[in-house]
């Protein structure tokens, strides 16, 4: 990790942080500097700031610059929970806390590197740093995802995703008592207008259409257990949509909002969000297949506490 410590001079004060850094670090591209800022690797007087922050005289700017990732991915012998495997596909049950593919701040320990070690033939399927990965789960979300082991399988699965025929069903525990028994959130999603690390519901024309269908499974005094089905697959879609209707996923510090919410009765490592069912047409046989994953211990523990909590 290359670390830089810089101080804003009188002559350069008032400039946007990203532009100021570009003049101070000419060997680093503007695009990479923006990525470093968004990843929290740039601090102004010890605090994170957005790219639009205007630097002031005397501010100390500290920048951490990780080495550029290699163009090819190194396999890592990390244990995987394999739900199904054949010559065409690999269905995995990802634990919360594991990143799917390398990115800023997550160069090693990824599911993609583990897949490459488990099935070396996936090298060259899809992108060089995402071998066979056709869809992903957030780091702190657990559950099912499918990996293509051949180019033909990759083309088939990506086409099914585009056609919205892949069945993806999640379980979530959310804040508040959700009214009604079922419903749909049909709201476009795009990058947050001021925080590029987050997604947000955006006006028509400024985001991509996103559709999430939900169904109540259990209600508690201050939480609801729901099933959420994706019709589209936008980044952070379920988290953004549920937060938008006032019921963020339990354990979600990013989209949970600033309002005071009842504390969770248990320590939550990860989100109370789990990809429980995954269905698609098998690329080799053309037959419909579906896989299921039981709720992980962290969510079962939370539900157990909620079920046995005294009535308000």
Image (cartoon, helix red, strand yellow):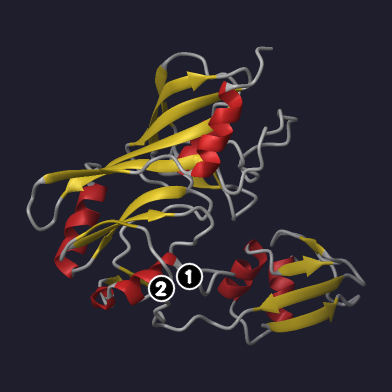
Q: What element carries label 2?
A: helix
Percent from the top left, x then y, of residue 274? 44, 42
Residue at x-position 48% and y-position 34%: 172
Q: Which quadrant of the figure contains the N terminus?
A: bottom right
Is 119 situated left or right of 255 in this image?
left
The numbered dot on residue 307 is none
Is 257 situated left or right of 139 in this image?
right
Residue at x-position 39% and y-position 79%: 75
Q: Are marks 1 and 2 in contact (CB under 8 Å)?
A: yes
Q: Is mark 1 on a helix, strand or loop?
A: loop
Percent from the top left, x then y, of residue 155? 19, 61
Residue, disc 2: 113
Residue, disc 1: 102
Is 64 situated left or right of 303 in this image?
right
With respect to residue 140, does 168 lie above or below?
above
Residue at x-position 49% and y-position 41%: 273
Inter-mark Cα distance, 1 to 2: 8 Å
Q: Nearer the viewer, residue 229 or 187?
A: 229
Outermost residue, left direction?
285
Q: Which quadrant of the figure contains the C terminus?
A: top right
Quadrant of residue 208 within the rendered picture:
top left
Percent from the top left, x then y, of residue 184? 40, 25
Residue 201 seen in the current view = no
């Amino acid at each position: 990790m290359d670390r830089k410590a810089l101080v804003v001079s009188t002559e350069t004060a008032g400039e946007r942080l990203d532009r100021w850094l570009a003049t101070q670090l000419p060997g680093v591209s503007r695009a990479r500097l923006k990525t470093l800022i968004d990843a929290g690797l740039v601090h102004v007087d010890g605090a994170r700031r957005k790219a639009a922050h205007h630097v002031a005289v005397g501010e100390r700017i500290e920048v951490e610059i990780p080495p550029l990732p290699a163009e090819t991915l190194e396999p890592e012998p990390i244990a995987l929970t394999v739900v199904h495997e054949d010559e065409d596909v690999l269905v995995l049950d990802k634990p919360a806390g594991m990143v799917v593919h390398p990115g800023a701040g997550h160069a090693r320990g990824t599911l993609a590197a583990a897949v490459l070690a488990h099935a070396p033939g996936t090298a060259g399927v899809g992108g060089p740093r995402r071998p066979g990965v056709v869809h992903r789960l957030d780091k702190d979300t657990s559950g099912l995802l499918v990996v293509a082991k051949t180019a033909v399988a990759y083309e088939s699965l990506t086409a099914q995703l585009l056609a919205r025929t892949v069945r993806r069903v999640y379980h979530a525990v959310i804040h508040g008592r959700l009214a009604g028994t079922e419903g749909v959130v049909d709201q476009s999603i795009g990058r947050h207008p001021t925080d590029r690390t987050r997604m947000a519901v955006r006006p028509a024309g400024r985001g991509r259409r996103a559709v999430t269908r939900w169904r109540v499974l259990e209600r508690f005094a201050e939480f609801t257990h729901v099933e959420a089905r994706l019709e589209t697959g936008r980044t952070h879609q379920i988290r953004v949509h549920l937060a938008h209707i006032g019921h963020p996923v339990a354990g979600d510090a990013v989209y949970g909002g600033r309002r005071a919410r009842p504390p969770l009765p248990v320590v939550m490592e990860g989100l109370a969000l789990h990809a429980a069912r995954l269905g698609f047409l098998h690329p080799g046989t053309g037959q419909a297949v579906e896989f299921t994953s039981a709720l992980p211990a962290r969510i079962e523990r939370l539900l157990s506490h909620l079920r046995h909590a005294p009535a308000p």
